[in-house]
Image: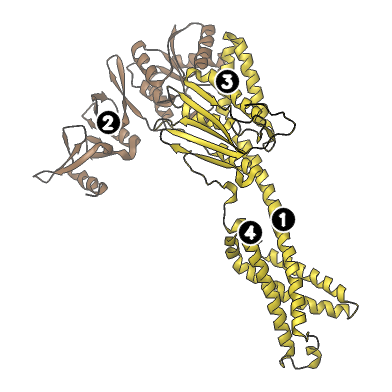
Chain colours: A yellow, B brown
Amino acid sequence: MTRQAPADGAFRGGSDSFYLPNFCASRAAVAIVLIVELTAVVLSIARSEAVDFGAQLARSSLFLLWIGLVGAALLCVLRPALARLGVQRGSLAALALLTATVAGISIATVLIGRSQLLGAAAVAAQFPRQLWPFVLRNTAIGGVITGVTLRYFYVTHQWRRNIEMRAAARVHALQARIRPHFLFNSMNTIAALTRSAPRQAEQAVQDLADLFRASLGDPNQTITLADELEIARTYERIEALRLGERLRVTWEVGALPLDASVPGLILQPLLENAIYHGIEPRPDGGTVHIHGERSAELISVVVRNPLAARGGARHGNHLALENIRERLNLIYGQRALVKAGAFGEEYIVTLRFPYIAAPGVPVRAG
Amino acid sequence: MLRVQIVDDEPPARERLRQLLEEIGSVQIIAEAATGPEALEQAARLVPDVVLLDVRMPGPDGIETARHLSVLEEPPAVIFTTAYDQYAINAFETRAVGYLLKPVRRDKLAAALAQADRLTRPQLLRLAAAAGTSRRTHIAARRREQVRLIPVAEILYFQSDQKYTTVRHLHGEDLIEESLRALEEELGERFVRIHRNTLINADHLQGIERGGDGRYSVLLRGSALTLPVSRRLAGELLERFRI
């Protein structure tokens, strides 16, 4: 647990996270042909009063296919460069590029029609004669259609990524659930207490049930910060039975707004990690510090634990931390921050996310 | 009457075993310990027949503690207790060592005790070695009624004669019964063979000297001695430290 993760979590990534599809792939080429043909049909219907529909469709298709395929080839080559520009500037560049392609091919078409290369007058008659009206009209239509298509790609991409992120968060929540070691040790503790301290055993069974109920909930469901703190305290009670005096936890959470809406299980796993990596491996135990703050509209929670002695460190996966990061990003986007790292003799995890009051819960003074 | 020692860092886990042992009867709980070193000190003094040993403990864990217990003059039979250690369980199962899963059941505990009672010393040694898949952090040396745990980091060198191996460390010298070859294999990179009978801790290497006769010797930090390097191994040593 020494990795310092970038604050933007799931939002990093190169050209692969860019919303434009890869136009070098054959599937995208098929989509281009489809868009071109639909556009050609629309244009031909609009003009079919004046001229023969079939001839008009054939002419428009031929013309638009050139634009479509040249545009696709350009996007295929320039996609990495556009991705580097970011969504806004990349989109503007793509729009400019495709509109310029439309204009360029329109001009070329008129010039070819005027030239003597084609010979037969019947063929030349199929070409537009006036340069600027043709070019301007096409550029306007091309600009609008390109804009709509880009928007379509963007929305589909966002929608798909959101689904992927939700699925990933769900899978990781499953993996990050209560450690089996904790479950069986707790059961063993309860078995011992059943005889010597039945009341404590009763409390432990209730606590364990609450904890499991919380961990079985929908990972994307939000709960109040008060409930999340209670889950963490429940967890502490069970661990305290097992570890006795070796476990000490200080709670400085008075400043936190208890009605804040948070995703479930963002704090308990941090306490669990702190105990598993920082307290259990130490023969004399240690203290976990939990400190909460609210500044303006941001909530921050810091969990600190002593580093295990050299050689006693446990190899843990980063699932819990990754999972919390994913879920916070899903809800708050870039405004959420999860930081973790060793500083001196301590391991420190910081969560920061916007304060959003849960609906229908009266504000309680901290 | 079977003399049993309970070792677990969690008080309720020890309590659970105590309750069950009292029910089983015909056993005597002679000691309880919360860490490996404490367990070892008690075991050397009180000589239990059976040790109920938790696998996951802070400091030297149960597996390492079992290896240290095996150097005792009369090593106890070890029954591991564990909540969930898939890898360790596999290791035990292949060698049919006693292990109990938590929460511990009374009939399983009784059966394990009965079986442990029948194990012979060579079997015990083999089991302890089989469980020890990871590197030890300490080396155990026996001194009459005591077992001393020497942190590997504090060891300067091992030197063997016909029967014993001498461990020279920051606080003195002890004898162990392990072979240099086994130690070299287990302790790995940090330890370097400089002579047929000498294995040094490279972390404590201070210098390499060349004598008038062209033979090399090493100087170790914290030790006034120089140790001779054999002709055969000198090249390798110089190569390794790029001298």
Label 2 element class: strand
Residue type pointed to by label 1? Thr
Q: Earlier in the sequence, mark 4 or mark 1?
A: 4
Q: Nearer the viewer, mark 3 or mark 2?
A: 3
Which quadrant of the figure has residue B203? top left
| Vertical placement of residue A285 versus B156, above or below | above
Are the residues flagged by discs 2 and 4 from a single subunit?
Answer: no
Name which residue lies at 76% across and 70% down: A36
Residue type pointed to by label 2? Ile
Name which residue lies at 72% across and 28% down: A362
- Distance from label 2 to label 4 (Cα)? 60 Å
Label 1 element class: helix
Q: Nearer the viewer, mark 2 or mark 1?
A: 1
Q: Indicate the chain on which mark 4 is placed.
A: A
Using a 10 Å C-alpha cutoff, classify the residue at mark 3 as few (fewer than 14 neighbours), some (14 to 19) or many (20 or more).
some
Using a 10 Å C-alpha cutoff, classify the residue at mark 2 as few (fewer than 14 neighbours), some (14 to 19) or many (20 or more).
many
A148 and B125: which one is in front? A148
Residue at which label 2 appears: B155
Residue A70 image offset from top left, x and y in percent:
67, 74
Residue A87 marker: 4
Q: Earlier in the sequence, mark 1 or mark 3?
A: 1
Is any atom of residue A291 visible in this view?
A: yes
Horizontal side of B78 relative to A9 (left or right) equals left
Q: Nearer the viewer, mark 4 or mark 3?
A: 4
Residue A299 image offset from top left, x and y in percent:
60, 36
B222 and A254: which one is in front? A254
- Distance from label 1 to label 3 (Cα)? 47 Å
| Vertical placement of residue B130 versus A139, above or below | above
Q: Nearer the viewer, mark 2 or mark 4?
A: 4
Residue at which label 3 appears: A237
